[in-house]
Amino acid sequence: MHELLATPHLESTAALLAPTDTFVRRHVGPCAAEVEAMLETLGHDSLDALIDTAVPAAIRLNRPLALPPNRGEHETLAELRAIASRNKIFRNYLGQGYSDCITPPVIQRNILENPGWYTAYTPYQAEIAQGRLEALVNFQTLITDLTGLEISNSSLLDEATAAAEAMAMAKAMRKDSGANAILVSRTCHPQTINVIQTRAEPLGLQVIVADEDEFDFTAERFFAVLLQYPDTTGAIRDYAAVVEKAHAAGAAVIMAADILALTVLQSPGELGADMAVGSSQRLGVPLGYGGPHAGYLATRDQFKRVMPGRLVGVSHDAQGKTAYRLALQTREQHIRREKATSNICTAQVLLAVLASMYAVYHGPEGLTRIARRVHLYAAMLANGLRQLGFQVASEPFFDTIRIDLDPTRRAEILLAAQAAGINLRAYDGPSRRERDSAHGSSLLIALDETMDRQQMRDLLRIFHGGADAGFTIEALAAAVTIDFGSQARTSDFLTHPVFNTHHTETEMLRYIKRLEAKDLSLTTSMIPLGSCTMKLNATSEMLPVTWPELGRLHPFCPSAQAEGYRAMCNQLEGWLGEITGFAGVSLEPNAGSQGEYAGLLVIRKYHAARGEGHRNICLIPNSAHGTNPASAVMAGMKVVAVACLEDGDIDVADLRAKTEQHAPNLAALMVTYPSTHGVFEGGIREICEVVHEHGGQVYMDGANMNAQVGLCRPGDIGADVCHLNLHKTFCIPHGGGGPGMGPIGVAAHLVPHLPDAERMQSDMRVGAISAAPLGSASILAIPWMYIRMMGGEGLTEATKIAILNANYIARRLEPYFPVLFKGAGGLVAHECIIDLRPFKTVTAEDVAKRLIDYSFHAPTLSWPVAGTLMIEPTESESKEELDRFCEAMIAIHAEIAAIESGEADKERNVLKLAPHTAQVVCGNTWDRPYTREQAAYPAPWLRESKFWPSVGRVDNVWGDRNLFCACVPVEEVAR
């Protein structure tokens, strides 16, 4: 039962010795009295009795989770700090697409560490997400201006996966179906090449890694060429001839570009690229041992409708005021399903916001100064090394220099650097652009904005046998002329006032707070989104994310420097394995969609290793998440739909027929449990057995794992693979649309095929899934903290309360709105679906918009059933908050009844005209057939605290027909 302190005079000495900051009682919303009251409403004598009825006995774990006992917040933070201190923070000059940077404190404190920004949900309800949508428009403008292309999405997962998305986009754009090859420059970053190869293989695409200068484009039918700018050795290449040859061959040109370098170098658009991809990490986002960082993809306007990921567009609201919203293919995978070309769902919104704010704070002049300063230091270092007798590459460079030297001397310098706490990059790729493609022995040194005089002296000392090189910084600087010649940027960028106004901390702080005030987050009220599990993101869980011990490690630093990360991740893998019942876990996938994809690739590898690589049929219920069929197609599988019954359960008879029909080629079944409809299906074991009998594997979507933890385990139920949404069940915040993490657990027979985190390129293992070996490593501290503070008993209690809260809401609302799907005893799992289709005068969208007036985010709208709302309260909400939500819904029912009866106008009523802004309510005129008070204060608690939307209902159709995705003129916003 819910952990409570006894009354002081009854406390034992032993009880008093326990920590006072134990976490379970802070995480779980209802107290013991509230639990008892809710159980009484549901007619159950105890919480265990409720769970025994709701969860089938055949799948119950029936033992405690074998996890460490819970600890207090202070103790747990100290324990993790001790682990993190085992990491060694060296000065990193490794480059390879990752740079140390300076996060402005005003941005770190007020965005990255601010729950008003990190607890918000994906901006599908645009009216209560105008702040982060504006920040994302700023991000898109930043990317389009710097890349010289017309349109950008609002962030992908990292540079390597952005390049892979661009590859798929280029293939979709190519009219010649026989064009099946992509040329990847061998001087692209290695992790990008690895991810491209992983993505291409199941799609049957040919990846040719070669020197683009010497390649014969007529030898194959190409659909794309991928170039690095500047390349991984630091060289700034003139790609004009390559671009011309590629276009002549009908291939699209994708350029992976350093975003900071583009402030001083010609843009990809000016160089003729069709797409530009990259990472915005160096714009103020910590290294974090690989993530999370916002990737980007920009393209030409004519290709916008095949661009993957999220796109923020500009529209207007019901009063004609400028308003932002997600545009076009915002949920492509849910709409197009197996015809989708991307499964991207979770993006990296919080990190894109950080990067955009970095650009707003510095402005174009500030960014250019940072870039010129970085280049100046690189040029100074090159001059100093030449004077010391080293052979420094002659090609133009931005921030990375290459020193060519023999292997023995290189090894000596690397040892000296390590002894000085410095990481340099050994490089054995092509040392010169020669026809013989000779490989050399080189060192690469990549500088960044943290560079200073002392670091320069220390670097030169390493190359001078540990002695001072004898150069003054001033002399080295005086010898440098910053001139990029014909490759210098001459075009303007970031001319919009937003990038030229907020350069003092006062102005920046006010701008950040203005945008924050436009967004509804968990700091305002519960966000009852079904399937999205918007639970508490505790402060103690979030604190470690910005510790230097976790934030300043480069993802490709020597493993000996990351012992703390290894220890933390090994523990986390073990805990997640115990929770799921699986033998192995991979933490690499940096989104739920990536977890789905990785899990299916593991299944694919397993079949191939057994000589059954022909198995390619993936059975997916009609009710499945849209990312499921999209992921299956990306994994090279063919989707076959399985019917569902009227009660939402999988039609086992249809499943049997499909498995028998496709038995020779059956690869997998993808199933969500509890079901997408929020019910524990009693036949789940039988479903797994049917698939196994016909040679298939069972992939379980972990979206609803919050109803399983401590009660049942996917591995015990019969699943072979399961991905976990750490941004749902395990408390990584949604961040307004990301970051997320989607690790996978697998049964013992699949462990040999888990993703190749060590990049050993084993034929047995799945290749690289994300750019960094541990994906978004720094945020793995959040689930580590959560599990450690909760312990097995606390996690199990949380699951029980989540089920209790969902059933309490269902029971309270059922007299007013039919609850669509129920399981044993008339109970649901951790979420419920209420049906709004019986009402003839209003829609589910009308109810969603009216809830804003009650200061609530709407539940999941019209999914998985059109015309419904799917509600998931989680365990973190108190009975008081649940009651407030229920009272809001009951009041809305009364408003609907007035419309249905004719008492209220069928078109001009509080639902159709919702939400109501302060500007409308306080306007000089009021011509609506209901009172201002009814519009703005429909519930008594709103007089104490009310969230005001900054815009009225947004016109989505107009926005798609008049697509505009960059910063709008100031006079437009002011309307």
Image (cartoon, grey):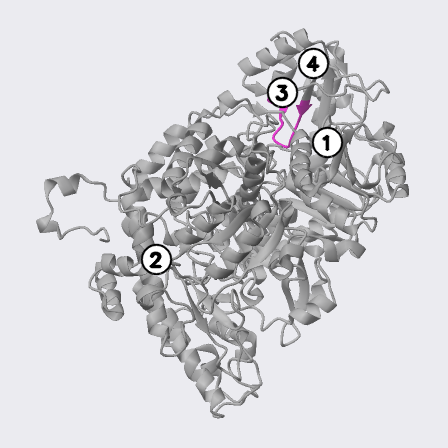
Q: Residues within 10 Å of mark 2 (few under 14, many from 20)?
A: many
The correct choice, above or below, for 237 with respect to 433 in the image is below
The correct choice, above or below, for 840 with respect to 426 in the image is below
Q: CA distance from mark 4 to mark 1?
A: 34 Å
Q: Nearer the viewer, mark 1 or mark 3?
A: 1
- Disc 4 marks which amino acid? Phe
Can you give x and y, in whole percent of width and height, for residue 304 in the image? Answer: 75, 56
**In the image, what residue occupies the spot 25% across and 61% down?**
35
Report the residue marked by disc 1: 188
Report the residue marked by disc 3: 424
Asked if residue 94 lies in the magenta stretch, the reply is no
Q: Nearer the viewer, mark 4 or mark 3?
A: 3
Tell me which label, 4 or 1, sits earlier in the chain. Answer: 1
Badge 2 element: helix
Report the residue marked by disc 4: 471
Relative to 261, 816 lies left or right: left
- Disc 3 marks which amino acid? Leu
Q: Nearer the viewer, mark 2 or mark 3?
A: 2
Which quarter of the figure has residue 952? bottom right
Q: CA distance from mark 4 to mark 3?
A: 21 Å
Q: Nearer the viewer, mark 2 or mark 1?
A: 2
Tell me which label, 2 or 3, sits earlier in the chain. Answer: 3
Report the residue marked by disc 2: 802
Q: Residues within 10 Å of mark 4 (few under 14, many from 20)?
A: few
